[in-house]
Amino acid sequence: MAREGSKLDSPDTSTNQTSNRSLWLFLALAFIPAWTIWFLSGVLPRVGVGAFDYRWLFAQVGAFAPSLAALIVSGLSGKGLRWNSFRILPVLLLPLLIPGLLTARSAPAGVAAIGLLPAVATVLVGAIVILFFSPLNRRLLTPGTGEPQAKPDPRWLFASIVLFPTLFLIAWALANLQGGGWAIAGARNGVPAFVWLVLVSFSHTLLLGGPLGEELGWRGFLLPRLLQRHGPMAASLILAVVWALWHAPIDLTAGFLVQGPGALLARFLWTLPVTILFTWIYLRCRGALLAALFMHASLGMLSDLGFSAFPNSMIIYFLLLAIAAAAVVVADPVFQTRT
């Protein structure tokens, strides 16, 4: 029997042990199903070149593992969060069941080739998802904290949409100053068609390109839990390692900037400044899930638009991301305090 007042019996120790178990359970549910489904789908060797067919759709189920893991682990912690998970689950599965199936049936080679019906379905379901995760939905609880979403400053919510595209456009312009091509393949059919492509690409990326499948896990569950123990920089570093390793099967098979095991390091070096900027906007938006979804979607959609000199732009883009992340860490007080 432990002595009275011993650490073994302290409420803080018990709470920490429970929290540690929930974190490890989350990580297991985020990694193991995703990796298993990716390998079974057979799409890993064709990443970046394969059609959006039924094998791609099956692989997308694995890409939803972090968000599903967050709902499961959060739901195990109490009745209120259990109902919260049940409310979120249909919205999480809607993209797979409607635009996902419609897209897979026609198997387009890329976002620009998606037919009208799946494109319209993608935009409409994207609008539903945005409304559901809006801070106006006061019934929605954050999986990692169990608290209702705080209402963010609209200016910071806007920043979550434009931050990454702005940095990319600067990088793209700098890459083309020495005689590169200024063409944008997606704009060849005129401005209205390009605006529609941007809308479809943003919606497709939001629903089926990573944000919805991942962000309830990374920023909705894991980051708030990490911020309860660490400052923003340490929490970002840990999350960057987790986020980068989660992509390991993709990177080891298809590469990431480089081929082979070096792709893992390249992924981490890329992910670290991105994660810092995500944490920054997350804190400035008071933990709004919609901000995380917007950031991830705006980051992932750019390759669909067909910018010229895109590979050259990526080197400059990375440098700008690193500079922006360093500036945030040094200059913004919100990154100097623990939450």
Image (tube, rainbow, N blue to C red):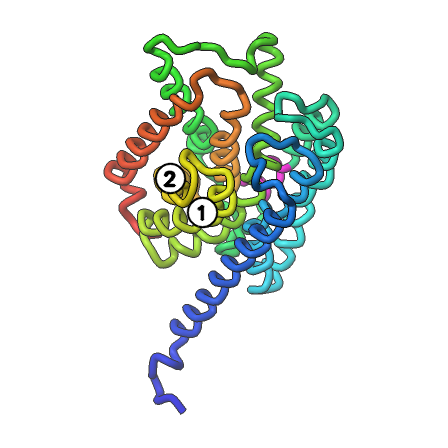
Q: At label 1, which amino acid type do we have?
A: Trp
Residues rendered magenta in the picture:
129-137
Question: Does residue 116 appear in the picture of this structure?
Answer: yes
**Residue sitting at x 62%, y 21%:** 112
- The mark total stands at 2
- Is residue 37 left or right of 316 when viewed as pictured? right
- Quarter of the image that includes the N terminus: bottom left
- Is residue 215 left or right of 86 when viewed as pictured? left
> Magenta segment: does it hold 266?
no
Query: Which residue is outermost to the bottom?
Result: 1
Query: Which SS class for mark 1?
Result: helix
Lower position in the chain sequence, tag 1 or tag 2: 1
- Is residue 155 left or right of 136 when viewed as pictured? left
Query: Where is residue 136 drawn, in percent x and y?
Result: 57, 39
- Residue underneath mark 1: 243
Closest to the camera, between mark 1 and mark 2, is 2
Question: Does residue 150 appear in the picture of this structure?
Answer: no
**Residue sitting at x 57%, y 39%:** 45
Query: Which SS class for mark 2?
Result: helix
Query: Where is residue 179 drawn, in percent x and y?
Result: 36, 8
Nearer to us in this view, 93 or 336: 93
Q: Is residue 319 above or below residue 82?
A: above
Q: Residues within 10 Å of mark 2 (few under 14, many from 20)?
A: some
Nearer to us in this view, 105 or 338: 105
- Residue underneath mark 2: 266
Q: Quadrant of residue 321?
A: top left
Q: CA distance from mark 1 to mark 2?
A: 13 Å
Q: Residues within 10 Å of mark 1 (few under 14, many from 20)?
A: some
